[in-house]
Amino acid sequence: MELNSYQQEAFNYQRPNIEKFGKKNWMWTIFFLLWIAVGGYALYLQIAKGHSVTGMRDNVVWGLFIVNFIFFIGLSYAGAIISGLLHLFHVPWGKPIIRLAQIMTVVSVIVGPIFILLCIGRLDRLHHLFIYPRLQSPMTWDVLAILTYLVGSVLFLYMALIKDFAVYRDAKLNIPKWRQKLYKILAIGYRGGASQKRHLIISQNLLAIIIIPLSIMVSSILSWVFGMTLRPGWHSTIFGPYFVLGALYSGTGVLIVAMWGYRKMYNLKDYFTDKHFKNLGYCMMVLAAGYGYFTFSEYFTSWFGSAKWDSDVINKLFNTAEYGWWTFGANVLGILLPILIVALPQTRKPKWITLAAFLMVFALWVKRYLIIVPTLETPALPMQDIRMEYVKYTATWPEWALTFAGIATFLLCFTLFSKFVTVVPVSDLEDSNQVTKSEAKTEVEKR
């Protein structure tokens, strides 16, 4: 597999990262595994003692687990849409970040559904979802859609990696023999011939064309799990586009944070440049404005309608004695702060954009929590049991332990991926200086 001088330089620069694991990587891996072990113990308690170890009760039947599921699945949809658009439109500056978006897609769609399994009281009946499905149920739509999407996202990532697998195969890396054999198998005989290139490009384009609308449809189906009910705060016609936009928004934030983390850890400043942060920052700002508009529409229509049940939920969200500070903080950190930081030239820098992205991602997780819990705490019928744990939902330590275990699994997968493949794609990488010259030449020709 032949590379040009710029691609060869990029590969040589990243080569040590996949040849050696390093002390820092071992430390992070052990740290993540410890959190996963704590989560494993919490899962054992949940299986042994039942859902009574969680804060979920008869009314609030969903809690942190569903919040985490929506959050991670949203990241996956965002990664697929971003990587698909960057690939189809051949965005030159987007080449280095396509792989990060694709990895985020696959890892999130694996981690997210795990939290659904944690909500199931009878795991021994899990296969009934496939043997006795109810096509009228949005839950069945969600299962089928996510499985289809998982296959598509894995194929999309694999197709993008084939060229690089061929590079690793021919590079005579200082790695164990089993990894050399694995790279050879995964390269499927790719040598860079004209016919192979053509077939690979066609396959990638078709997958990108399929994965983008598939992500939008699957995200919409997830929103219908809530929107098809008659509960206040859920029964809304804007929930489909609201979920899609929210997924794209949070996914852009995670992509910025991941880019900053890899840039610091592996010194990839020449590949994840300030231009990448600014461009993704602009995308984040536009998405923040759109998400803010949808959020305002959601709150305003429910408040103005003055229906009693809707009013009860709105009062919970804006009452400072209940969720008012949560709502205020989520909207300030999740909508206003990213817009202000990116809009001002003084703060339009990688570290500030990354900070805004990190806070925004946390705020959007809180926003998912505010979508789920306040609604479930507002039943339509009078409650027969008024014990506080039945009225209010409070997450227990096993729920938090499993939540952090899921986050640790997500970060561990990112760590292991970066030691198995180069973080920045090698075979499709373009020299940023050459791209700049080409853009300048095109601009001159237009004039």
Image (tube, rainbow, N blue to C red):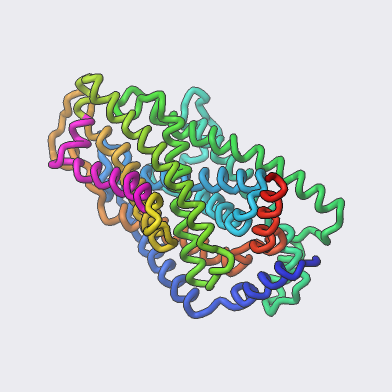
Percent across and percent down for residue 438 are 70, 56
Question: Principal SS element in the magenta part?
Answer: helix
Give the residue at the far front of this rendering.
Answer: 447
The quadrant of the picture occupied by the N terminus is bottom right
Whether residue 324 is in magenta: the answer is yes
Looking at the rendered structure, the number of numbered marks drawn on it comes to: 0
Left or right, residue 210 beside residue 405? right
The quadrant of the picture occupied by the C terminus is top right
Above or below: residue 303 compared with residue 25: above
Q: Is residue 166 in sight in this rendering?
A: yes
For image coordinates 63% across by 56% down, the residue present is 95
Q: Is residue 113 in sight in this rendering?
A: no
Residues 145 and 163: in front is 163
In magenta, the rendered stretch is 313-341
For image coordinates 44% across by 71% down, the residue present is 28
Percent across and percent down for residue 290 are 41, 37
Whether residue 57 is in magenta: the answer is no
